Amino acid sequence: MSERTKIHRAPQKESFDPAVARSIVERALVAHVAIVVDGQPYSIPIACAPFGEELLLHGSTASRLFKHLSQGHPACVSITHLNALVLARSSFESSMHYESLIALGSARILSEDEKRPALQALTDHLFPQRRAELRTSTEQEIKATSVLAFPLAEISVKVSAGQPDDLESDLDADVWAGILPIKTTYGVAIPADNLKPGLPIPHYIATWVIG
Ligand SMILES: Cc1cc2nc3c(=O)[nH]c(=O)nc-3n(C[C@H](O)[C@H](O)[C@H](O)COP(=O)(O)OP(=O)(O)OC[C@H]3O[C@@H](n4cnc5c(N)ncnc54)[C@H](O)[C@@H]3O)c2cc1C
């Protein structure tokens, strides 16, 4: 935490527990990376994976985002898990349950030696157990990929949970109030149109969980 990441609004929702931050990162498949180019902010969603104390990001070496990050410009990375809608007795008090993490810093370019294992870690995070049956990435593919590690040192974590926070004067209203959980799950796998006939859906997909 720093002066820049100190939460002012609803500070009771701030979490300083490293396990909470870790859990948010470990369950994330996507992060939003915000950069400022020529005075214009852009917030770009990309895949991500935990990488030690850092967050792993990868993209085309031709991408503006990755060129910008590779030049060491400051960025802001955010991860959000939306857990529920909070149905209060007024629109004003209606809200959401969430866990969110914001990290400030500059990305680190991974060395050529670090790139391949990092990309393998990313594949293992997004598609567990699948790498064993995939062909090895070519040198050309690795070369065309920018692999960066974003620090998770200057972070803030906000967790919203709990009951609708209604006004005392609204509690008597004939309006249902409560929590509507949001569950994100994988659907049924759809074979590719050009799949070689006879190939079954991989068994490990059934073990994948999200969120
Ligand atoms: C799914 C979701 C929906 C939300 N909906 C709304 C909404 O509709 N309206 C609304 O006003 N707010 C909403 N919030 C809360 C919002 O993210 C901000 O926390 C809030 O608006 C206060 O902003 P601020 O700039 O005044 O925060 P400040 O407390 O002034 O921010 C200071 C620092 O606190 C940290 N911080 C702020 N917000 C977060 C966060 N969410 N997670 C982690 N660190 C944070 C950052 O490091 C920031 O630099 C929502 C959050 C989530 C995750």
Image (cartoon, rainbow, N blue to C red):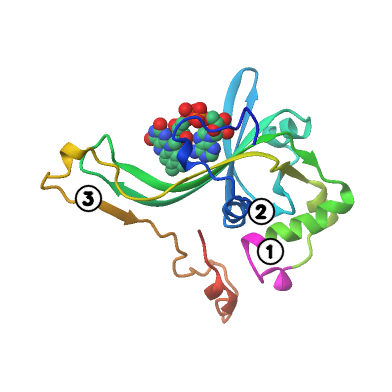
Tell me the CA gap for discs 2 and 1.
9 Å
Q: Disc 2 marks which residue?
A: 49
In the rendered view, does 63 fall on the left or right side of 97? right
Part of the protein shown in magenta: 124-134
- Disc 3 residue crowd, few under 14, some 14–19, many 20+, Cα 10 Å: some
Residue at x-position 82% and y-position 52%:
115
- The answer to which of marks 2 and 1 sits earlier in the sequence is 2
Q: Distance between the residues labelled 3 and 2?
A: 37 Å
Q: Residue at x 53, y 33 (%)?
A: 7
Label 3 near ligand 1 (CB < 8 Å): no
Determine the secondary structure under disc 1: helix
Tell me where residue 151 sits by quadrant.
Answer: top right
Q: Nearer the viewer, residue 195 or 129?
A: 129
Mark 3 vs mark 1: in front: 3
Tell me the element at label 2. Answer: strand
Looking at the image, is mark 3 or mark 2 nearer the viewer? 3
Q: Name the residue under label 3.
A: 177
For residue 124, which numbered disc appears in the image?
1
Mark 2 vs 1: CB contact within 8 A: yes
For the point 44% across and 66% down, which residue is it?
A: 187
Up-down relation of residue 165 to residue 186 (above or below): above
